[in-house]
Image: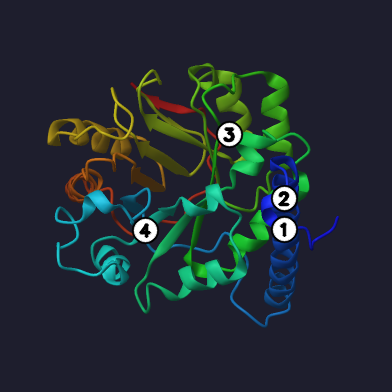
Amino acid sequence: MDINVPRKDIGLDERRKRRRLRREKQRAENVGRAEKMHLARLAGKGPGRHSTELANSAYVGCSGWFYWKWRGKFYPAEMPTSEWFTHYAQQFDTVEINASFYSWPTVANVKTWLRQPGTRAFVYTIKVCELITHVKRFGDTETLVKDFGLIGDILGKRMGCFLFQLPPSYRFTEERLRAILSQLDHTRRNVVEFRHASWWNETVYSAFRESGTIFCSCSGPRLPDVLVRTANDIYLRMHGPERWYRHAYSEGELAEWAERIKNSGARRAWVYFNNDYEGFAPGNALTMRRLLDQTGFDQAPSEVECFRGGSVIIV
């Protein structure tokens, strides 16, 4: 490859090839750094391993925090964007990181996330890169899954869940189910979100329960309106029941979900609002947290045995 060829003379395929090679090199370099940090933690030179104990039994937040349409609704209109995260973290103790879905996170990215909350007790869920879930669709991705886990481990006590979101065209088959579960590190909090209704079935629930994998329940168009528990933790993403990302949940709708969460018997609940397009997510998340407080669910979690019962589905 002649790197001296002017960019304007390089064809589209060649530019894509160069971009892919740059990304692969960057990913390899960052994974190498993360692996060294991981080994240092195991040797007692850094923060503890993954699956750290968490203080809360309910983590309620939003799927991301940097949205222009939140200005004037959640963020004061005159507030500079450099202060947005601080404002968000004053209201919530968790957020889903979406940037990691579109671009493999660097060690520098993760260290920034680690520092951002300051002294606040703040926890992240990291959305796993689309290279694993959408491009390769768990096809021979064992190494990629392992490498992504090492990157996330840098967060230490701020690491919550790894969220694997599959595309709507990804339908259930037993072969796909085995491929997913065989590649996950089950010492981590793994959450798998499906966007096709065929995955809501007892075969999936049973396999998730046996592996300790968290099934992501969803409030979204054309998806079953149920809360599924397959582990000690439950995980719920609120996208909007009729229109993706645009629904303003009423207090009555949120109260129904809060009651389901209370009755689930779960040790811990993760609830994230992804109805961000019109700026509804922060207000809905604050209401949900208040409602969970009122139900008595949001108390310090007690030590319980690993969930071994049948799946809990609340209709």
Colour pattern: rainbow
Asked if residue 120 is positioned above or below residue 265 in the image, the reply reads below
Question: Residue 199 location, x and y as percent?
Answer: 54, 21
Q: Nearer the viewer, mark 4 or mark 1?
A: 1
Q: Are marks 1 and 2 in contact (CB under 8 Å)?
A: yes
Question: Which residue is disc 4 drawn over?
Answer: 94
Question: Which residue is disc 3 drawn over?
Answer: 209
Q: Nearer the viewer, mark 3 or mark 4?
A: 4
Residue drawn at point x = 18 percent, y = 50 percent: 290
Residue sitting farthest toward the bottom:
45
Q: Nearer the viewer, residue 3 or 256?
A: 3
Question: Residue 168 location, x and y as percent?
Answer: 51, 24
Q: Is residue 120 left or right of residue 110?
A: left
Q: Is residue 89 left or right of residue 293?
A: right
Disc with the residue nearer the chain's start (3 vs 4): 4
Disc with the residue nearer the chain's start (1 vs 3): 1
Which dot marks residue 68? Answer: none
Which amino acid lies under the numbered mark 4 shown in the image of this protein? Thr
